[in-house]
Image (cartoon, rainbow, N blue to C red):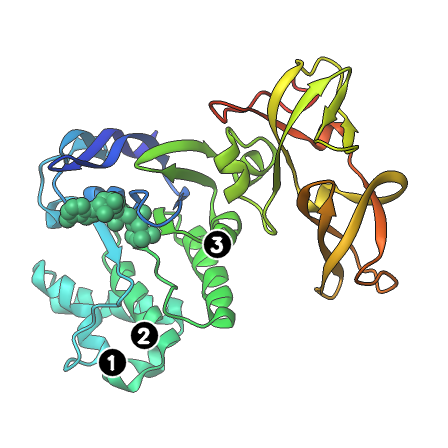
Amino acid sequence: MSTVSLQKLRKTYGKIVAVEGVDLEIAEGELIVLLGPSGCGKSTTLRMVAGLESITSGALQIGNRDVTRLEPKDRDIAMVFQNYALYPHKTIRANLAFGLKMRGMPKDEASQRVQEAAEMLDIVHLLDRKPGQLSGGQMQRVALGRALVRDPAIFLLDEPLSNLDAKLRARMREEIAMLQRRIGKAMLYVTHDQTEAMTLANRIVIMRDGKVQQIGSPLEVYDRPANAFVAGFIGSPEMNIMEGDISGGQLNLGGDVSFAVPQGAVPGQVTAGIRPEALSLTDGGVPFSVQGIEQLGSQTLFIGMMGDHRVRAMTGRRDDIFLGDTITLSVEPSAIHLFDRESGERRGAAGEG
Ligand SMILES: Nc1ncnc2c1ncn2[C@@H]1O[C@H](COP(=O)(O)OP(=O)(O)OP(=O)(O)O)[C@@H](O)[C@H]1O
Ligand SMILES: [Mg+2]
């Protein structure tokens, strides 16, 4: 049974279509990440679920109730905002209790909930401080706490970690994932950061220009991107995407560059995608002239030219290859993604038929 159901949710502002018919069923306890570039409609979708934006057409159900036209307070949701939105003159305790008080919860019960949430988030020692006396990470915890005390059907988070430095962001990300599993409630989480999406999500919804491109688990969208856009957006470093054509069981990428493709790959013009980590150093592979080297510790990223294509290749650590060297690379036929040149739609990687 799904907790939340988005049915053809659409949002227009005059002639601007911000969100074009999003369909999504969110199961109890599921963590869904809305992912996509700036302006693709992530926040608008989330805000329609929250009730902060009216729904132009379509329907929204939360816990089997149609809430399409209900006020935010009547929807059984709790939202965590990027800017925290804490009351500066109230203590953290009062900030956490505020929403509960507004809803008329008895004082004892509210204190109890605040205490429990504070323990879960490890902020008990901060309860008597004011927001101005907290660090960014602590403030983020309090913002989460304020949603947590509400015990809603679904948590809505819009880029909640974007104000934190990289290290803290990674830590908070882990904590949010653990917390969400512990409380077992649904969560809809917006980010433009594919790493955040890959590490947090049960399922990722990838959007572009107001339209859903693909919905799938992190490994599904990594292994079988539905189109060239998803292929380029998911994965780091970014997939190499090149125009080529298929004939005689070979993907020809211009010049003398060609790779074997699986049997059954349909001849013709294609857009091909090869992940940097799918390329390997092999004798007798395709020549690649090294123009850049990034040592990442356990891995090495090479940037260089393969024929006319600028390509990234990621290998295990190598410190015996230098700028200006020419090395040779190969790829398993089944690791080459093929997309329709015109539409960008997946043609099936190799081996998928
Ligand atoms: N009030 C508004 N009036 C007109 N257009 C709007 C309004 N709010 C949003 N839009 C447009 O709707 C589209 C989607 O915006 P939205 O804020 O949902 O994007 P987003 O995916 O959250 O982007 P970001 O990653 O930058 O936050 C954009 O083209 C935006 O310009
Ligand atoms: Mg946004």
Q: Which quadrant would the N terminus be assigned to in this image?
A: top left
Distance from disc 3 to disc 2, alpha carbons, whole Å, reads 20 Å
Q: Residue at x 71, y 13 (%)?
A: 264
In x, y percent, where is residue 253? Answer: 70, 31
The secondary element bearing badge 3 is classed as helix
The type of residue carrying mark 2 is Met
* Sequence-wise first label, 3 or 2: 2
Q: Is residue 44 in view from this perspective?
A: no
Residue at image point 66% right, 22% down = 245
Q: Are marks 2 and 1 in contact (CB under 8 Å)?
A: yes
Q: Amino acid at mark 1?
A: Pro
Residue 14 drawn at (x, y percent): 11, 37
Q: CA distance from mark 1 to mark 3?
A: 26 Å
Residue 232 location (% of width, % of height) = 53, 41
Which residue type does callout 3 highlight?
A: Glu
Disc number for residue 131: 1
Mark 2 or mark 1, which has the lower sequence index? 1
- Work out how far the residue at label 2 is from the one at label 1, CA to CA, in angstroms: 7 Å
Residue drawn at x 48%, y 54% as measured from the top left:
196
Give the vertical position of 213 relative to 249 (above or below). below
Residue indicated by mark 3: 196
State the image quarter where residue 113 is shown.
bottom left
User: Mark 1 or mark 3: which comes first in sequence?
Assistant: 1
Q: Nearer the viewer, residue 150 or 84?
A: 84
Identified at 18% across, 69% down, the residue is: 97
The yes-or-no answer for disc 1 within 8 Å of ligand 2 is: no
Residue sitting nearer the eye, 156 or 238:
238
Residue 142 x, y percent position in the rendering: 30, 71
The residue indicated by pointer 2 is 139
